[in-house]
Image (cartoon, rainbow, N blue to C red):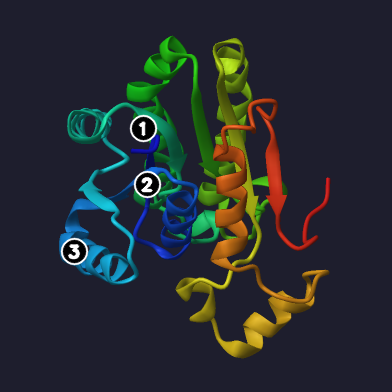
Amino acid sequence: MGKVAIVTGGIGGLGTAMCKALCAQGRTVVAAYYPAEADKAAEWQKARKEEGLDIAVYPVDVSDLESCAQLVAKVEADLGPVEILVNNAGITRDSVFKRMTDAQWLAVINTNLNSLFNMTKPVFEKMTSRGWGRIINISSVNGQKGQFGQANYSAAKAGAHGFTMALAQEGAKAGVTVNTISPGYIGTDMVMAIAEEVRNKIIATIPVGRLGTPEDIARTVAFLADDEAGFITGADMYVNGGLYIH
């Protein structure tokens, strides 16, 4: 059995591609899903089995520390030590700041930023004690450049890489790498639901002339999770088609 990998937000568009890429790498993959989506997770798992992929599904509320600790404990009891963690779960609650409520702010900060602490806390020390680990945090181009109407989301996603840079320094000598991936506009269901006229305007701003695919992000996850990627840590991988270059 390969190294155990948890992907939070594992049954979404990006998460699905990540799970498949890690399976192809020989990992034992766990797709973690929001507890209210149990029916969707069961259908998702069935679809993966029909594709020949055996991916475990476990519920977790990434905004709750105890829920994350329980997930890790259950996975470790069932499958073995968690050696790869992809912090992918995220939400949006967009609003111009003057109308943004504290509930919108806190929902995004708790799910997109506090979740990194909540999920990483139960696995990090064990990774360092074993001398190997891969932690991959999914940020966003909007955490780098900001975005109108996304003060909450941009703040959380910028914080994600700050977390990466600090933790990378703590894990480096113990063989644990911590990296960020910052996707640009990806052709997920959410983006494809945008009106075509608006979507075409977005594509016009991307130098490579297209939206990214979930597989573009998943390949980067697999690259950073690879056994041979031990010299890459504290990095922010821009996967945005040239939309933002720094």
Q: Are marks 3 and 2 in contact (CB under 8 Å)?
A: no
* Residue at horizontal 40 percent and vertical 28 percent from the top: 120
Q: Earlier in the sequence, mark 3 or mark 1?
A: 3
Q: Which residue is mark 2?
A: 8
Callout 1: helix, strand or loop?
A: helix
Identify the mark at residue 119; answer none if there is no mark: 1
Q: Are marks 1 and 2 in contact (CB under 8 Å)?
A: yes
- Residue 160 can be seen in this image: yes
Q: Whole-percent x and y of residue 231?
A: 70, 25
Which is more foreground, mark 3 or mark 1? 3
Residue 106 versus residue 94 in the image, above or below: above
The quadrant where residue 78 appears: top left
**Which residue ends up furthest to the front in the rendered image?**
1
Residue 51 or 152: which is nearer the viewer? Answer: 51
Callout 3: helix, strand or loop?
A: helix
Q: Earlier in the sequence, mark 3 or mark 2?
A: 2
Identify the mark at residue 3; answer none if there is no mark: none
Q: Which residue is mark 3?
A: 42
Residue 119 or 233: which is nearer the viewer? Answer: 233
* Residue at horizontal 58 percent and vertical 26 percent from the top: 177
Disc 3 to disc 2, C-alpha distance: 16 Å
Q: As shown in the figure, which amino acid type bears the numbered disc 3? A: Ala
Q: Is residue 48 left or right of residue 113?
A: left
Q: Quadrant of the N terminus?
A: top left
Q: As shown in the figure, which amino acid type bears the numbered disc 2? A: Thr
Q: Earlier in the sequence, mark 1 or mark 2?
A: 2
Q: Whole-percent x and y of residue 117?
A: 41, 28
Disc 3 to disc 1, C-alpha distance: 22 Å
Residue neighbourhood size for the residue with mark 3, other residues' Cα within 10 Å, grouped as few (<14), some (14–19), many (≥20): some
Q: Whole-percent x and y of residue 3?
A: 40, 34
The quadrant where residue 196 appears: bottom right
